Image (cartoon, rainbow, N blue to C red):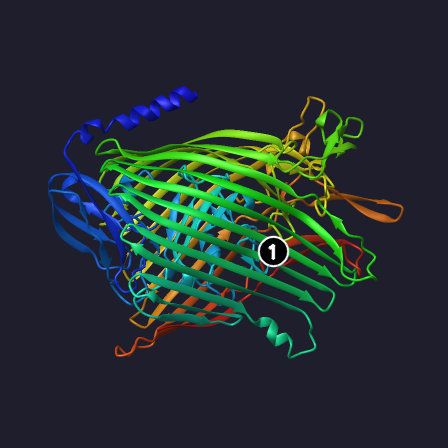
Amino acid sequence: MKFRFFAFLLFLLCLPAGLIAQELFTLNGLITDASSNEMLIGVNLIIPEANTGVISNDYGYYSIKLPKGEYNLQISYLGYQNIQTTINLDADKKMDFQLSRSSEDLEEVVITSQNKGLNIRKPEMSLNRLSINTIQRMPVVFGEVDVVKSLLLLPGVSNAGEGSSGFNVRGGAVDQNLILLDEATIFNSSHLFGLFSVFNPDAIKDLKLYKGGIPAEYGGRVSSVLDIYQRDGNSKEFKMQGGIGAISSRLLAEGPIVKDKGSFLIGGRSSYAHLFLKLTDNTNSAYFYDLNTKLSYKINSSNKLLLSGYFGRDVFRISQNFDNTYGNAVLNLRWNHIFSDNIFTNLSAIYSDYYYGLTLNFVGFNWDSGIKNLNLKYDFNHYINDALQLKYGIQNTYYEFNPGEIEPINEESGINYFKLINKYAFENAFYISAEHDLSERFSAEYGLRLSNFFRLGQKELNIYENDIPVEYNEDTGIYREAEIMDTRSYSRSDILKSFTNLEPRVALAYTLNERQSVKASYNRMTQYLHLISNTSSPTPLDVWTPSGPFIEPQVLDQYALGYFQNFKENTYSLELETFYKQIDNRIDYINGANLIANNAIERVVLNGESRAFGLEILFRKNTGRLTGWLGYTLSRSEQRTPGRTEFETGINNGDWYNSNYDKTHDLSLTGSYDINDKWQINTNFIFQTGLATTYPTAQYEYEGVTIPVYGERNGDRLPSYHRLDISATFEPKRNKSRDFRSYWNFGIYNVYNRKNAYSISFRENADTNKNEAVRLSLFGIIPSVTYNFKF
């Protein structure tokens, strides 16, 4: 199998040999914003005569090889004026382009797509980009602009309900999403337990969500990749922008360090609703703050340094008894280097830290936990010719897991010091991928990723009889924690267990005509980290654990098939995709599992499997006064944990059951209408099948205590979820002699005040003594207003 894949890869790479034999010249350069020198990602460069084109990479660089001749070059990018120029290519040429914004108004297009039919010809599928200006328009709870909440309007993306953190992609769990901010891993993407995301929209330049067909450069997760890049900062002149909302405000400043060579960007955001509580006798508080920074410096035409960082914290306090602090901190130092006209490289040194702290004064202890990693990666973009582009690189990551540490805060505390055992791991990977135009109609993106994971030594490792940490009692049919026979100590340099996985990726596109294409993709991915949580929406207390002697890595195989069509010169577009994904070694928990402060988590988890399949429809109107999209997903997400032997029942009798994030129907409709130069109306409508849950089916009394009897796991559902949001954006007439501009956003979240169920609990009515179901709803109708400015 491996030999056949390598032979196929070699065959494809050899196909353009005839083209290479021609006399080819290189056209390359950088594409930037004319007003700020900001590097622009994903700019389209089209050469109609050669029926080819190229897209600028994540650092604004492009390169293409063509035979000698005269060509018309067309450059287009969302929100910018197009450039058309004629070039005479009779030698290698370096040409940098600066694009000017087409309008100072808010951009019209809601989901970006490759112009001039590139979205039809390219083998990319299951990929969505959202315009930041579109995100800023969308009506959201409390009027706070939110990147993650905007993703939920795309087909195949959902979450566990209002107030839930993270997002689920194609029936996957939250921990199966790789979230990158300037290439650094974000382990918790939410503020205030899921009400807001950690991403400040003012600081974001580019956002891509891969749901499938994931390129070989990404690894470590089995569901999706959310890749976000921060802006570089303006190297021409000083600028500021910000916003004042109902419960939070933000401010961002940028400007040159050395004009046209170096720039800085610094942005801050904070909530302040807790300050109003101080005006009363209420001593509780809940707030967040974060900071985005970036420095960039162009050494010369071939070298550039970038230093970016993010720091965020959430604070949740109840009186003087409970104090909770958690958040992310990341730092990335990058070196962009152009080796030659057709080789672009990026070397990154990345630090990422997720911290969780808890103080319980009434008990008298502090709790600290978290995960840190150091990542060194080196990536190459190699432009072979106009038909073939290679990407390859190496990635090395060191992990340190702190499952928890309890420390008494005073002498009166009844708690003794206790430290859960730290865990360590090392992950490395090599990848190579090719984007290849095999003919005028047929193109492919294919590659291979080789990943290794080493579970390193730790202070103590539990020893079990027959290496089985979870026992099964055949008489009672119940799983229970196995007895710890002994412990063994290891040094950090020891390897407890290692894993090696080959992860092939391939995506194909066949163009039926200039407006239609069919695409297919397959990718295998491996995930070595696991989030220990028995809730559908993770909490900050949930901890990450690495694969090792008792927990196997998750392995995904995903297949997708799609049909794509543009209408009326790309005014409308249609995307149909069907997918199937199978994940091995998805962890499950035995009944009654204790996950908090558990020093032997392997005693309560079992390796199972999961699967998801479905159909996604995305119909878009991309231009005009009315823009928007209709997204619909019909899907199924299931999980099962069969018995390890024929005598074991497994979880739920080894049968498939609905996962916590299974939703049969998911419909979203979003639209934006420009009334005139001053007013715009934006609206969202969402309908979703209720989340899977488990209800009690009976009850009995034992020694005066009523004990519920539950049915099959996730055999029931919450009521269907639906709501309508609307907002209006008002931009006063600008004084063209001043740089200052501003606009107001007025919104109503949940217009018809739908009481959507966050959960349903059961209790005995004190008056009637009958059982009753009680619905818990978080949000009703919520009006909001936000003032935004820029100068």
Quadrant in the picture for residue 436: top left
* Observer-nearest of 21 and 262: 262
Q: Quadrant of residue 20?
A: top left
Locate residue 760, reporting x and y percent: 66, 53
Kind of element beneath mark 1? loop
Q: Residue 458, image x and y in percent?
A: 67, 38
Quadrant of image for the N terminus: top left
User: How many numbered discs?
Assistant: 1
Instruction: Classify the position of the C terminus by image quarter.
Output: bottom left
Number of other residues with Cα within 10 Å of mark 1, as a class: few under 14, some 14 to 19, many 20 or more = many
Residue at 47% of width from left, 57% of height from top? 309
Q: Is residue 406 above or below residue 281?
A: above
The residue located at (28%, 57%) in the rendering is 32
Residue under pointer 1: 757
Image check: 650 left or right of 680? right
Residue closer to the observer: 200 or 778: 200
